[in-house]
Image: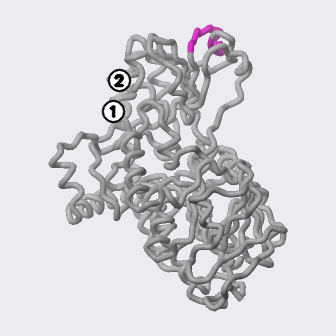
Amino acid sequence: MWADSNVISRSIELQGISVITIKGSDQPAASNALAAGNNPDETQYFETLIIGTGFSGLLAAIRLQKKGFTDFVLLERSAELGGTWQVNSYPGAEVDIPTSLYSISFIPYPFNKTFAPQSELLAYTRHIIDTFGLAKKARTQQAVTTLRYDENACLWHAETGSGESFSARFVIDTSGVLANPHIPRIPGAGSFDGPMFHAGNWDHAVSYAQKRIGIIGSGCSAAQIVPAIADKVSRLTLFMGKAQWILPRSDRHYTAAGRYIRTLPGIRHLIRGFVFILYDVRFIAFRRYPGTMSISRLMKAYYRRRLRRHLEKHIRDDDLRRHMMPDYELGCRRVIPTNDYLPALARENVDVNISGIECITPTGIRTRDGREIGLDVIVFATGYYAYSDMKRALTFQVYGRGGRHLNSEWEKEAVSYKGITVSGYPNYFKVNGPNTGTGHSSQMSYMEAATGYIVQAISAVKRNPDIKAIDARRDLQDAYVARMRAKMQKTVWQNATCTAFYRKNMTGEVTSLSPESLTGFILSRSWFRLGDYRLIS
């Protein structure tokens, strides 16, 4: 039986370490360590362990607090809280979904423009942290290295790179799938004499003013960096890979009155609802519904004509213009919404090389057409591993019942139940798990749905003193995975011929994106059913 309210205290032996909880509060004795500091040799107990402090981690914490569950800790591997928008601070970084939808539905904020820049998103993150007092519940520079389930105690035990240990009844893993930068192996990379870094780890100590900058990659981050720095550098060379679908967007700055009005409850929800519907309708273009195929083809033909016109307007070089026209179906790779990228490529001090890179030299890059391009700084705008390399899908080792190893299992087959729980890993909840990413709308909406489901699950377990843990039923998980795969076969993401970071090994099974519309995703996770789980008592 789980400890009840009549127990004064008890000691749990967890891998040789004693953990003590005290009656009268959700707070275990070790929780005081947040304020007082800890002996790294002692395990600190919390009822719930939240890994990561991006939007999904903060959402999980807020939902727990709203339920009155205050015995939790947030572990952040960086020195500052904030997740993606704290780490990704490269020039020009901004969201590519309107902030009316890319924001938490119940936390308004007076954003300055339709697509908020990184600085505003980070300010919004800090506003959330301050509003809900989450800084005092968090521990920074705590990179989890191992997460192991103790079947006897029904507890999870976490080790961090700092040497500290934590144990918890529940784990909410919100570590992001875009947390592992992808840097391609290019011959000679170690020989370059100048600064060289990934866009996701931008080195702000390095000045790019009046320098020769080389940017490798032409995805979303490159499309934001190029126009942000092109007018400040002496020369910029973009080493472009595969063509991308580049589409203009409607972006505007708001007046002070406009910002205020957009935060008013009725107006805010009306705008959010409109944008939600608008973006979810776009799912028609990516899912091959029998009755909407003709609409999908018309939409894609329209966007192809639109891109062709913009390329003809801005790109003078015939070879480059032909190269930049995608030869694959719209949606197969992530669409890039931008108004500034193509005009920036047309600048006199910007070159685009499409011949490919042969090697990096001490003074720059040698291309496959034999050119030697001198550079002062090299930036890799080459994206993240996400679920393309399942060895890197999890940022730490996870061991479940019977010594099962989630990392190894997901290398072979990335499966879960509803993208949140995994059979064999009791009381372990994953936000942004397999097939929960969005290819057409706001990831924030997916996070809200997932964290709502998770806190419902924790509430159901806590209500029943006879239940120590829940474990997803294998039969239901298998049926769920089969349904997702069948639905995925009817999407452009699985069937179109292109490489993408959301596919296993870039070309295989789609392991990241959800084949459901956002509406369907939310509805299917709105109610938690205890019967979907094996109860451990």
Q: Give the residues in magenta.
A: 364-376
Image: 255 above or below 74:
above
Q: Residue at x 55, y 55 (%)?
A: 513
Quarter occupied by residue 517: bottom left
Horizontal relation, residue 294 to residue 44: left or right: left
Q: Which residue is mark 1?
A: 339
Q: Residue at x 67, y 31 (%)?
A: 184
User: What number is the disc on residue 343?
Assistant: 2
Image: 119 above or below 151:
above
**Which image quadrant: the C terminus?**
bottom right
The three-letter amino acid code for the residue at tag 1 is Asn
Q: Residue at x 44, y 25 (%)?
A: 226
Q: Are marks 1 and 2 in contact (CB under 8 Å)?
A: yes
User: What number is the disc on residue 211?
Assistant: none
Q: Secondary structure at mark 1?
A: loop
Horizontal relation, residue 142 to residue 318: left or right: right
